[in-house]
Structure formats: structure tokens, C-alpha cells
Image (cartoon, rainbow, N blue to C red):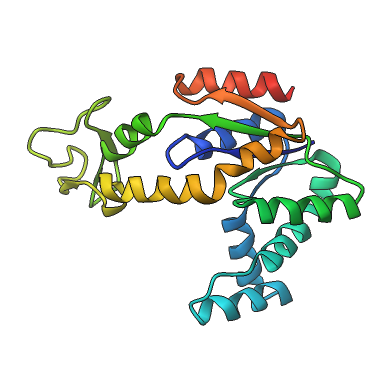
Amino acid sequence: MIVILLGPPGAGKGTQASALVKRLGFPHISTGDIFRANLDAGTPLGLEARGYMAAGELVPDDLVVRLVGDRLSKPDVREKGALLDGFPRTVAQAEALEGFLTAQKAAVDACVLLDVPDSALVERLSGRRVCRGCGQGWHVSFSPPPADLKCPRCGGPIYQRDDDSEATIKSRLGVYHDQTSPLADWYKSRGLLRVVDGQAPPEEVGAALAKLLA
């Protein structure tokens, strides 16, 4: 089974992906992990990607698909399937992935969307606070930090990261809606889209995902 996990920033994809792979026993594949593995190993694909990155350019879709395709060709994926997290990000990448899988006599079995409205995402992400010293986290609504903004664990200052500012979050959501959100309609047209309410408690979201993919 090959499953794509789709959702906006802050929807909980990382948390749910980790739980799913433990529950269902198939590999978790993220483009970040694939890039790091190929760069560290100095593979031909990694060296090709490094050239674009060193020049400050985006790695082209064709190369990203070849990197993902190389990972999908490994024995563990052929035996157990895979959960794709963070790929594809665009319809062009989805089309390229479909072409690759068709050539391998394989296919995506489902695309699962964690559906969370923008207003909830902004509240969820902008409310995060973190200790600059040890990294412990809080949330102003759900688990407020100490009033003096000093970490009780290490005494470090508690602050809001730049990428958790409301303006930055809205910008990231704009990019998601422009580039990645159309994937939902693309997979829906193929009868592969499944939607899960991402606002539910994490354990309920996890149970719904497991039921869909069982």
C-alpha cells in the first residue's frame, strides 16, 4: 500500500505519520530524509541535488521524483508499502509520481487529507512558545508557559519563534493553498482522496487514519 499524507502546515502530519508507521508497519518516507540520506552518502542523485542547492536554486521536480522513486524501489517498500509525507507538493509532482509508479506496475492507493481550517491553524501555530535553552514547548491556549517566561526546567527564556508569527503562518498557508491544496482535487478526481477531521484530538485523528488504511 502506498499512501500520501496531505495537509496544511500545523495540521499534525508529522505526529500522525509517526503513529501510523508504528501501527501499520510500513516505511515513513519524507523528502527531507531522502535528501539528507543521499547527500550524506554522496550518491549520484545526491551530488546532482547538491549542485542545485549550492547554486541557491530549487531542486527541479524531475530530480525530486527520481530521488523519491529510488527510495520507493527499495526492498522494504516493495514488501510493505510506504507512507509519503511532504511529497508530492504540486500537481506536477503528482503527475510525475504517477508516471513513475505506472512504469513500476504500482500505484498510489490513497491520499489522506488532514482537514483543518486556516483560523484553527493560525491559533494552533501562533500560540506556540519554546524555551531558547532546552527546547521545551508550551501553548498560550492549551498549556500556557509560566507568567515570567522563564523555563522551569533550565531557567532559559521562553519565546515565540519567528516562523510562528501570525504573518509568517498566513504566508505559509498562502503558499500551501496556491501550490499544494490543488492536489486534493487531483486525487479526488481519481477516487483516491480520503478526508479526516484534523481538529479532533490527536488520538481520535490517529484512530480514524488507522481505520481508513486498515
Q: Residue at 33%, 38% (x, y): give it.
A: 125
Extreme left residue here? 148
Where residue 148 sits in the image (x, y, percent)? 7, 38
Q: Residue at 63%, 50% (x, y): give it.
A: 87
With respect to residue 88, does 109 lie above or below?
above
Where residue 120 sits in the image (x, y, percent)? 36, 29
Where residue 64 sits in the image (x, y, percent)? 67, 63
Query: Observer-nearest residue: 185 or 99?
Result: 185
With respect to residue 200, does 30 lie above or below?
below
Q: Quadrant of the N terminus?
A: top right
On the rendered structure, is 16 left or right of 96? left
Where residue 17 sits in the image (x, y, percent)? 58, 37
Q: Residue at 42%, 38% (x, y): give it.
A: 10
On the rendered structure, is 206 left or right of 190? left
With respect to residue 118, does 84 lie above or below?
below
On the rendered structure, is 4 left or right of 161? right
Q: Quadrant of residue 67?
A: bottom right
